[in-house]
Image: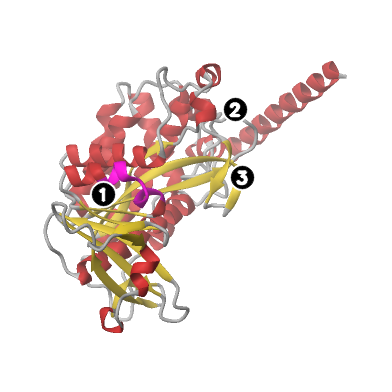
Amino acid sequence: MFDELMGRIAGRFTRVEPRRRARAFVLGLLADLPRKNCWSIAEHAGDASPGGMQHLLAGARWDADAVRDDLRGYVAEHLGDPGAVLVVDETGDLKKGTATAGVQRQYTGTAGRIENSQVAVYLTYAAPRGHALIDRELYLPKSWTGDEARCRAAGIPDGTVFATKPKLASRMITRALDAGTPACWVAGDEVYGADPGLRSDLETRQVGYVLAVAKSCPVNAGAGACRADQLAARLPRSAWQLYSAGEGAKGHRCYDWALTGIEPRRRGHRWLLIRRNRRTGELAFYRCYSPRHVSLAALVKIAGLRWTVEEDFQASKGLAGLDEHQVRRWTSWYRWVTLAMLAAAFLAITAGAEHASQPPAGQIPLTRNEIARLLTALTIQPARDTCDRLRWSAWRRRHQHRARTCHYQRQARQL
C-alpha cells in the first residue's frame, strides 16, 4: 500500500534523485525518531549530510500542490463516500523570531492563548471508513501581506493578498469539490460559522453545512431576530432529544439536542441546532443548512464529525511530524506539510482497511498508532552502520562549531 502511494506521486518529480529522496523523507516522517527534521531524517536515510533533504524542501523542482491533488485523490479513492463531510479547522505551531513565513503574536488553540506562532487552516475528509487531512493553506496576517520586502525575504509569491481563515477554508473546499471529491456536507467551528461569505458560497453550491456559532449569534426564527441563546431558552422540554455525537475513547458522546427552524422565507432548509451537556447544562450552537430536509439525527452525526479534524491534527503531529518543520520559507513549509499529510494519510487509509475486516477475537482493529509502531519495527530500517553514525556525529559537531563561532563574532562586532 505504501508503494502504491509513492507510485501515485512519482510522476511529480522529474528526476529520479528527488523522487527517491521524497520516498526516504516520507519513511523518515513515519519512523519513530525523537525529533523529525532534515538532520534526523537524513541520518535515518543513511545520507552523508542533511543537504539533500534540505534541497528537496527548498530547491528541487516539484510541485507541492500537484502532490496535494494526488493525496486528495488517494484519500477519496480509498475512503470516498457520497455523504462524506469536509471539516475545516486551523492549528498553530509555536515559533521563535519573526522571519518564519506568517509568524506573529496571535491566538493559537495549540497553546490556548496569544503566542508567537504560525497558523494554518486545514481540510479533513471524514467518511464512514476513515478520515484524513487533504488540503492546507498557510494563514498570512495583514502584518505580512502589507510588507512586500518581508514577504519577498520569506519566498512568498508576489501578489499574495490577505485572506481570512474562512476565505482560505472556502478556497480549499472549492478545490475539493471542483476535483470531484465525493462530499455533501461541511463542518467547522465558530470561526467559520460566523462568516456569511463562507455560508453563502456553500449555499450557492447546494452543499449542506453544520457550522458552530456563538451564543450571541443573531438568528431569525420567523418572529424577528434574537440571540441563539434566547431562542434556546424558549424551547419546551419536549424539544430536547438524547443522541450520541459519535464514539469516543470511553464510550458514546451523549448529549441532549434540540432543533428549530430559522429564516423560513429563504430557499432551502435552515436550522439552529443546539447541544446541551447532560452534566453541566452548557449549551453549544450550530447554524445548519441543507437544500433538502434532513433529520435531527443526521445533523447530530455531522456535528459530531467535526472532531475528526482534531484527531487528524493529533495523529499527523504525533506520528508524521506535521508540526516539527524547522523551515522559514513559504515553499519549504508547503512541501514539508504536504509530505507529512501524505504520511498521515497512509496510516489513516491502512487503518481504514483494517477496520473493514473483522479483527481477531478479543482485539480491536489496528489503529493508526499501532500501524506506525509495526511499520517502524518491521519495515522501516534506519542506517545502522557504525561509520555512518560516527560521520554524522562529526558533521553535527562541525556545524555546531561554525554556528557558535558566527554567534560570537557577531556579538563582538556589536560591542
| Residue at far right of view | 415
Q: Residues within 10 Å of mark 2 (few under 14, many from 20)?
A: some
Asked which quadrant contains residue 412, the reply is top right
x and y, in percent, of residue 409 in the image: 81, 19
User: Can see residue 24?
Assistant: no
Tell me: 220 left or right of 101.
left
Q: CA distance from mark 3 to mark 2?
A: 15 Å
**In the image, what residue type sits under mark 1?**
Met
**In the image, what residue type sits under mark 3?**
Glu
Element under disc 2: loop
Residue drawn at 40 percent across, 43 percent down = 121
**Residue 1 badge:** 1
Q: CA distance from mark 3 to mark 1?
A: 40 Å
Of badges 3 and 2, the one in the foreground is 3
Residue 215 higher or lower than 234, as above or below: above
Of pointers 2 and 1, the one earlier in the residue sequence: 1
| Residue at far front of view | 223
Residue drawn at 68 percent across, 32 percent down = 394
**Residue 413 badge:** none
Tell me: 229 left or right of 109.
left
Residue 72 higher or lower than 100, as above or below: below
**In the image, what residue type sits under mark 2?**
Ala
**Residue 99 badge:** 2
In the picture of the structure, the residue carrying the numbered disc 3 is: 115
Instruction: State which region is magenta.
Output: 191-199
Asked if the residue at tag 1 contacts the one at tag 2, i.e. Cβ–Cβ closer than 8 Å, the answer is: no
Q: Residues within 10 Å of mark 1 (few under 14, many from 20)?
A: few
Element under disc 3: strand
Q: Is residue 263 magenta?
A: no
Residue 296 higher or lower than 45, as above or below: below
